Amino acid sequence: MKPQRNANHKRIEKIMAAKLNSPLNSDSGNRRVKNAIIELGVGDYFRGTVKILRKAKPGPLILSVFDGTGTINAIAHDRIFEDAHPLPDKENEGNKGNIYNLGNVIIKDNRKKNQKKSNSSNNIDTKTSTTTGSTTDENTDTTSKTRLLTPDDMNVDDVVKIFGKVAMHRNNLEIEIKSIRSSSMDFTDIINTHTLPVREDFSIQSERYDSMKATFVNIAQRIRRAIVEEQPILIRHHNDADGICAGLVMEHAIRNVLAAREIKPKNLIYRSPSISPFYDQIDMFRDVSKFNKYSDIFGDKSPLILLLDTGSTPENLFALQILHSVQFECIIVDHHNPGKITDGKSQICHLLQFHLNPYLFGWDSQTCGGMLCYELARFVDEDLDDPPLYPAVAAVADRCDISEVDLYIEQTKKTKEELLEFALVIDYLAYNFRFDGGDGLYDRVFTNEQLVEIIAKEVHHLFDASFNRILPTISSTNLNGVLYSEVDLEKYTQRRKYPPPGKVLGKIHDHLATQHKDLIVFTGGFFSDGIIIRATEPVLPVPDLLIELQQAFPEANVNGGGHEQAGSLKYISAFDGSIREFIKNRLENRE
């Protein structure tokens, strides 16, 4: 069902429409001339200043344009450009330029020769542009501060004045352009007014959220602006229950807003999981290549990339540098430890438009990605008021233990055990989907009890078989009050088979923690070239251990990351024995 425009959204559009259709802008003739796209009907004429969102050529010039109240396609046939021819300018002959006859209008070109084109994305002459909240003043401007436009002159994000008749084409309104000319109007205030989030509060009371509110609002407004300007949005999220929930709720919010604004989502919203716990360079190069191809072939804008439940750690630096170098805008919403923070900024913040991470505000990883993205999605889509299943499932899956989690669980009217079953099924689906987004199936986890029951039964069977096979092989020792256990994942698990080694280790670690509640439990699952870590307390935080190992074994190519009490590291297999001894010595000699 297509979402309805809510009262606040309609109010903004009506206010803008009232300004545009004021007597100052009305046509005195018999034709119904309107200056607000939202008010248009078949047979009306439109005269107004618009921003170009999309451009298609060859054939008739097809523009998708926005005026502050709505979006519409505008078609310009070649004949309106063919009538243009220069006339002598007697007043300024040989001095300042030509006068052009463009059929419906006569335009005086005052541009100086060899004047360089502005580099602004809006192609605005900063010497003459003014910032206004509506197009009223610009629409009544009959001065010569305009220029002849040809199809090659017009680019995406340019601002132009158009006049034309409204017709119906394939069940959609469109404007048949009669004349088109340049405009020096700045659309910044109009876009800002139209995209400012309506909501002011979070779904629950939270000191954590309140401290980050400004960043929530800024990111939501940037996403809403991308929707209005028809800029493609790519959602990249971690391929686990937390990341899946983060990606799904954000995609739903964006699709709802697109539908409410009657914008077709095709080629505007993409979602793709990342198997690595960071924005892997393989994923990054694929994304850059894909969107460059779309830009070259279809004229699409560069995307706004959202990295959810991933992206914050130093391992992302290389990929983010590449994105920045090719001018792909990126926003990160994550809860992983970003490493060193100076003046509220991490080492990757300068490469981002916005970075929402609780660590940057003095908090920890307990506010997971799904929780953050649910609240962000509510600012993006003010009609989003579904029970908070996404943040609740994400929180229990990521073992978050703060008061906000209890509030979410209470609102879902589900037990924690039921939510854990949802998380278990989502993890299983994510493992099998791998790089696929799983469209249409993840949502059924929350509505199809039989589906959950069937999958959960199979998953429990697979876990039990792995657990019973590995448990007798575990070796444990007490290191200065820490129960240190080694699990040989290389021998007793199968790569590319479910359950994956990390999930198996988590189940074993939970069992050991239950059996030894009087000790700190540190469980390491080893391969010949890596380790997966789980711990009941941050006695050796994974981000810190990563840095220590990189310094102690610079030739081992140690990389990876995670949270303080859970994570994974990879290294050259020749250093496996030395790294194991290093970890044991650090635990035994801890203060």
Image (tube, grey):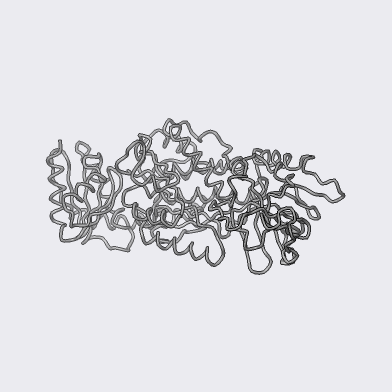
Q: Residue at point 65% right, 39% down? A: 133
Q: Estimate the x, y position of residue 465 in percent, counting from the top left.
A: 29, 58
Q: Estimate the x, y position of residue 468 in percent, counting from the top left.
A: 25, 55
Q: Using the image, determine if residue 14 lies above or below residue 324.
A: above
Name the one closer to the observer, 268 or 188.
188
Would residue 369 appear left or right of 189 to someone viewing this image?
left
Would residue 477 appear left or right of 390 to someone viewing this image?
left
Which quadrant would residue 206 be assigned to in this image? Answer: top left
Name the one closer to the observer, 203 or 544.
544
Q: Residue at point 44% right, 64% down? A: 289
Which quadrant would residue 499 be assigned to in this image? Answer: bottom left
Q: Estimate the x, y position of residue 136 in percent, counting from the top left.
A: 71, 42
Q: Estimate the x, y position of residue 263 in percent, counting from the top left.
A: 63, 54
Q: Using the image, determine if residue 450 lies above or below residue 535.
A: below
Confirm whether residue 421 shows in the render: no
Q: Using the image, determine if residue 248 lies above or below residue 404.
A: below
Name the one closer to the observer, 512 or 580.
580
